[in-house]
Amino acid sequence: MRIGILTGGGDAPGLNIAVYTLTKLLERKHEVYAIFHGWRGILDKEVRRVTSKDLIDFAFAGGTFIRTSRTNPFKDEARVEVFARNLKELGLDVIVAIGGDDTLSAAAQTQARGLANVVGVPKTIDNDVYGTDYTIGFDTAVNEAIKVTESFKTTLISHERIGVVEVMGREAGWIALFTGLATMADFVLIPEKPVNWDAVANKTKEVYRDRGWALVIASEGIREYGSPRDEFGHSRLGGVGNELAQYIEKVTGLEARAVVPGHIIRGVAPTAFDRVLAIRFVTEVFNAIECGDFGKMVAYREGDIIRVPITEVLGKNRLVDGYWMKLYETHWGP
Ligand code: F6P
């Protein structure tokens, strides 16, 4: 068979190892094609035959060697025709789409319209793809956010200040929650649990009085006070951490600083967890292709790798709730 692989949406550490490993498994029996720039690669016919040898040098780095884009051809009916025609001409039997909700929704459309068979792989540093406990890139992003926070903490202590770290996480507070837990921050703000900023200011003042510094982790997605969004719903300004630090300074009269690691936590080499997760995911993709089980997304559930219908996971985010919300509330609840 002719099998295409693409990565769509924001990049995430672990994509290269996923593409490399899948190519290595598939090339024994099939022709493997890299679809460059996500779904845009079909519209532009930017599709090239690849071998694992072409990919090995980049396999363990961050980013995505086959590039990415946020193009979703199904958002514009005029493009769907070009997409369908090109796909036919390219003769791809199967497309493996590695991405978040939007990329996977285009995969579901491709399958539903009978344009090609698809298998999906969940990735995003935000860890908010529905139906899977973990997505490729989350663990690495958290580890990097922890590193940044620990460095920031040393200077907060030296100068006796209050610090705010704003981390990515547009809809869900997973990165903020895990970073906050791993650094035992004094307050964590996540979109799933709106809190009054006065409560944050009071808490940090109390902690400051006790030990001379305080640390807050805030998710960029905290709704009420979020920066203006662009057409993709992203808060590009990365401004909410700074706003919060200024607010704390105003209310408490204490010196506060903010850092926004932004894309830095997204661009590094994958951790062991993300490497193994990527390998486990694509091994299951290989199994799905071998037995002709299409229209599925591979997922991590309670330690196992399973396949779920892509249509079941679309249009919703996996948010912090249940056990994780209880954990949040135990540490930072009222
Ligand atoms: O893909 C998820 C994400 O990293 C979000 O956490 C963030 O809001 C967004 O991507 C940033 O997107 P961009 O790379 O387009 O600025």
Image: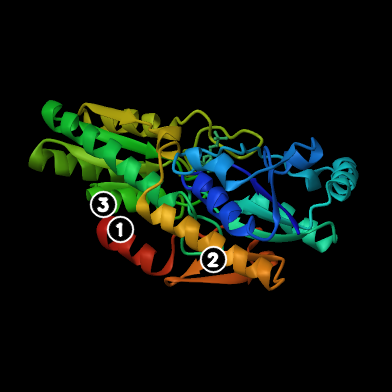
Residue displayed at 80% across by 39% down? 43
Q: Is residue 270 above or below residue 258?
A: below
Marking on residue 203: none
| Camera sees residue 246 | yes
Q: Where does residue 182 sit, x and y in percent of width and height?
A: 26, 51
Element under label 3? Answer: helix
- Which residue is the site of mark 1? 333
> Which of the two discs, 1 and 3, labels the residue nearer the N terminus?
3
Marking on residue 182: 3
Ligand 1 contact, mark 2 (Cβ < 8 Å): no
Q: Where does residue 161 sit, x and y in percent of width and height?
A: 18, 30
Name the foreground residue: 209 vs 157: 157
The amino acid beneath tag 1 is: Gly
Quadrant (top left, top right, bottom left, bottom right) of the N terminus: bottom right
The amino acid beneath tag 3 is: Ala
Residue displayed at 84% across by 45% down? 83
Element under label 1? Answer: loop
Q: Quadrant of residue 253?
A: top left
Coloration of the structure image: rainbow
The amino acid beneath tag 2 is: Ala
Name the foreground residue: 151 vs 176: 151
Q: Where does residue 309 sit, x and y in percent of width and height?
A: 67, 69
Would residue 223 appear left or right of 324 to someone viewing this image? right
Instruction: Answer few, some or many: residues within 10 Å of disc 2's Cα (few below 14, many 20 plus, some between 14 and 19).
Output: many
> Which of the two discs, 2 and 3, labels the residue nearer the N terminus?
3
| Camera sees residue 201 | no
Ligand 1 contact, mark 3 (Cβ < 8 Å): no
- Which residue is the site of mark 2? 299
